[in-house]
Each structure stands twice: as C-alpha cells, then as structure tokens.
Image: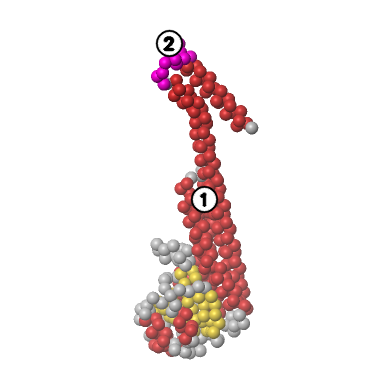
Amino acid sequence: MRHILFSYALSGDQRGQALSGPEIARLLRSDDLAWVHLDALDPGAADWIAENVPYLDPHAVEALLAEETRPRATPIGDGVLVFLRGVNLNEGADPEDMVSIRLWIDPHRIISLQRRQLKAVGDIVERIRAGQGPEDAGAFLSLLIERLTHRMEPLLRALDDEADSLEEEVIDEASPALRRPITEVRRRAITFRRYIAPQRDAVAALRDHPNDMLDDLDRRRLLESQDRLLRTIEDLDAIRERAQVVKDELAAALSDRQNQHLYFLSIVSAIFLPLGFLTGLMGINLGGMPGADSPNGFWLFVAGLLVVTGLSILWLRRIRRR
C-alpha cells in the first residue's frame, strides 16, 4: 500500500510499534491512540480513507484531500481539523516553497496527509522509534507545531544574515548587480510571512479552544510556539523593511554616481562649447579673416583659446561655490 507512508501506535500495549495492513484500521477504531500518515498524491489515499475510516466527517475528508490549503484549525465534534506548513528542506527545493501537512486529530486517532516530505514529521517518527514519542493527541499536536517552528528558525536567521551582508555591500560599493539579490531577499521574506502569519493564528485558535485533548502542559507549549511564530513574523517584517531601505540606498547611491558623471560631462561641454564656436568661426575660408596674413596669427589664436578656457574654468568654479 504505497499510499500509506507509515503508521504507529502511540498508546496502549502496542505503543511505539509500527502498524501495517488491517491492523491500522482496527487500532484507529479502538480506544488507543494510533497515527497513520498518508501520501496525498496517491489516488489510493482517498479510497483508503473512505473504506477504513468512513466515520470521519465528510467535510473533514474533503478538506484533507484538497489540493490547496492554508494554515488553519477547525474544531469538528470531539476532533480538530488542522492544516500547517513547514519549510521545504528537500534537496534542490526553495525553502520558502513551504510544504503543507493536513491532519485530523481526535483523542483516539491521528490521520495526516502530505504531498511532499516534511522533516518535522521525520523528527516525530525518530522520537517514536526511540521510545520517546507523544502518548496522547494533545502532546502530538504541540510537538508537531514545535518541530515545524524549530525547523523554520535557522533559515530565517540565514535570510537575516543575507540582508546584513547586502547592506554592507551597498555601503562599501554600490553596484547595479545588487538590485536582484536585494529584491530576492524581500520576495522570500514576503513569501515566508504569507504562510507563517496564518499559522500563528491557527496555533492561537488551538490554544484558546476549550478542547479536552489539550492539557495545561500542551497549552503552555502551544503558547511558546505562538510566541516564537510572532517573533518570526516581526523578524520577517524587519527584513522586508530593511531590504526596501537598502534598495532605496542603492538607488540613491547609483543616482549620485550618475549625477557626478553628468556633472563632469557638463563641465567638459561648458569648456569646449565656446572653443568649438571659435574654431568653427575661424575655420571658414572667406576673405578678410583676421590674422590670415600674419605669420603669428595661429599662435595668437591658440593663446586666445587658452584665455577663453581659463576664463570658463574660473567662471565654473565661481558658480559652484554659490
């Protein structure tokens, strides 16, 4: 059954044991807590749910199999439908292309689906195999949110370091080539925030809902995850604003550099404009040109040009001081 990625008993006599075959559906129906993790891309996942857990709310099943999801938490009866997101740490993937996990959780069963591998789920599996896995639904949910949040933080610190590095480069030497990486940092911060902000709201809704699955310890852990998500959102807002400021500084530096070049060209034009006029005027071959019959006419004209050049420079320096 390729659509079943793995399944474990989380409580009772079989606690920590991997489940397979009909045993999965049997334990899901029992009073003990069991977890099955399905591949949402496999068509067999929908058939398996319909055949083995027909008692689930139809709206919950439809939401679990939906193609697009956003982080949210919706209580239904004695269970809760939870959609969460985690950073994409798969090889060759963009971390900000966040991976979704969809869960139905009630006191006796956990049914989760994924479309891509999520390392936070792997963290829980490792704890279960080591005999340190969660023993009830509330502990599972708080642990999953904690691991999802923990996996985000190193990538966000790296994004913050990248913003710092770009800011230093702009201060040291502004270059048009920096425009693209600055825009990329801002885009990534916006993408991360698009999913993390609703995830914070989903965690807050879970913590505040009067659900018997969550004890005081679970609620404290959810509160800590909510606070970490809030700090993450604040950091993303700061990165986005800093990237915009750095982009403005880069634009200002490049504009100043362009103005300096234009000013230099203006000076050269101001100096050579009268010289060009005089040489063009004296270059016409008409009778009566002054100095045409004088052996020193050329040198006198060059001396006149030097005087005009000197006067132009003095005039430009004088107006610059004003």
Magenta residues span: 284-300
Q: Tell me which amino acid carries mark 2.
A: Asp
- The spot of residue 283 in percent (x, y) is 42, 21
294 versus 252 height, above or below:
above
Q: Residue at x 62, y 82 (%)?
A: 210
Q: Residue at x 58, y 72 (%)?
A: 201
Classify mark 1: helix, strand or loop.
Answer: helix
Q: Tell me which amino acid carries mark 1.
A: Leu
Q: Nearer the viewer, mark 1 or mark 2?
A: 2
| Residue on which disc 1 sits | 166
Q: Gap between marks 1 and 2, in whole Å?
A: 67 Å
Quadrant of the snapshot with the C terminus: top right
| Residue on which disc 2 sits | 293
Does residue 210 show up?
yes
Q: How is the image coloured?
A: secondary structure
79 versus 184 height, above or below:
below
Quadrant of the snapshot with the N terminus: bottom left
For label 2, count other residues whose C-alpha is less than 10 Å away and answer few (under 14), some (14-19) or many (20+). few
Q: Main secondary structure of the magenta part?
A: loop
- Between 86 and 217, the one nearer to me in the picture: 86
36 versus 262 height, above or below:
below
